[in-house]
Image: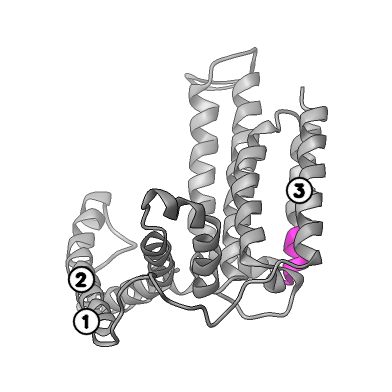
């Protein structure tokens, strides 16, 4: 499972999403997180699902690869769906299982919240899959540049986010190695009572934390050895350029937002 995790990874490609300016992708993702809450009926959610499918096709990513990489998140979505079914008691009872009753509004909200969660995860994952961490850092720093006037550490924040994204797949690989080493010593992670499974996580977490701190220290030492002193006075090797496709993406986003506001209940 750790080897299939795709969040935080970059997959090289030549799709229109790969060629887009990172600032337009960041603005789109931040905007999509807001407008997804405008959907509140079948038509608006259908529009969002169709739009995300179109974005996936434009990214030229394999759908099976995306679904396999997001399996842990899909389990979380299923858990959220079940919680909504069991604890939302609004509307009429449409189905009963023993003492548990499934209500009309509970089923509706379970479906809509699960779709919303699903769309947000896919859109944010597509951004990281089609954008290198360095380019993402440059885009985020460029968008937050006006905050420099109030002495906000824009460069440092962008750098921290970039390092965090870069370390996600690294830590996943490290976790996979530690799990295999522990399994070779007789530790069972996927069988036995839940109490024993929780106990088996302890010998996994301790070496993972030690390895993480060691990597962080090595990175800090390497940056100091190369004379890193923050963003002040630094020039850019890669210059960001806003092109026609970015303007077209912004126009499509505005049209989508207007349609959602118009068609919502």
Give whichever of discs 1 and 2 has the lower sequence position.
2
Find residue 249 and name its label: none
Pointer 3 residue: 253
Work out whether 42 lies above or below 18: above
Q: Are marks 3 and 2 in contact (CB under 8 Å)?
A: no
Which colour style is shown?
A: one colour
Q: Is residue 54 left or right of residue 232?
A: right
Find residue 213 and name its label: 2
Q: Residues within 10 Å of mark 2 (few under 14, many from 20)?
A: few
Which stretch did the figure color magenta? 54-61
Of residues 235 and 65, the one nearer the viewer is 235
User: Is residue 58 rendered magenta in the image?
Assistant: yes
Give whichever of discs 3 and 2 has the lower sequence position.
2
- Tell me the chief SS of the magenta region: helix
Of residues 177 and 243, the one nearer the viewer is 243
Which quadrant of the structure image shows residue 172?
Answer: bottom left
Work out whether 15 lies above or below 29: below
User: Is residue 36 rendered magenta in the image?
Assistant: no
Residue drawn at (75%, 53%) of the image: 250
Residue drawn at (68%, 80%) of the image: 13
Q: Nearer the viewer, mark 3 or mark 2?
A: 3
Q: Is residue 237 left or right of residue 245?
A: left
Structural distance between the alpha carbons of marks 1 and 2:
12 Å
Q: Residues within 10 Å of mark 3 (few under 14, many from 20)?
A: some
Structural distance between the alpha carbons of marks 3 and 2:
41 Å
Find residue 221 and name its label: 1
Which quadrant of the structure image shows residue 186?
Answer: bottom left
């Amino acid at each position: 499972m750790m080897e299939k995790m795709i969040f935080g990874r970059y997959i090289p490609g030549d799709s229109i999403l790969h060629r887009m300016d990172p600032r337009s992708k960041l603005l789109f993702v931040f905007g999509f997180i807001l407008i997804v809450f405008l959907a509140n009926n079948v038509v608006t959610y259908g529009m969002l699902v169709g739009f995300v499918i179109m974005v996936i096709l434009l990214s030229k990513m394999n759908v099976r690869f995306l679904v396999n990489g997001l399996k842990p998140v899909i389990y979380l979505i299923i858990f959220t769906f079940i919680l909504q079914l069991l604890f939302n008691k609004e509307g009429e009872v449409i189905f009963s299982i023993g003492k548990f009753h499934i209500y009309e509004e509970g089923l509706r909200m379970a479906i809509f919240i699960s779709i919303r969660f699903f769309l947000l995860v896919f859109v944010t994952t597509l951004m990281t899959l089609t954008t290198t961490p360095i380019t993402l850092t440059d885009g985020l720093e460029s968008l937050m540049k006006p905050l420099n006037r109030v002495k906000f550490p824009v460069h440092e924040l962008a750098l921290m986010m970039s390092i965090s994204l870069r370390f996600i797949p690294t830590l996943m690989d490290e976790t996979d190695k530690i799990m295999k080493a522990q399994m070779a010593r007789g530790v069972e992670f996927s069988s036995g009572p839940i109490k024993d499974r929780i106990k088996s996580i302890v010998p996994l977490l301790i070496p993972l934390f030690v390895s993480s701190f060691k990597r962080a220290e090595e990175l800090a030492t390497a940056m100091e050895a190369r004379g890193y002193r923050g963003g002040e006075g630094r020039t850019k090797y890669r210059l960001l350029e806003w092109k026609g496709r970015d303007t077209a993406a912004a126009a499509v986003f505005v049209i989508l937002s207007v349609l959602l506001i118009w068609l919502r209940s």
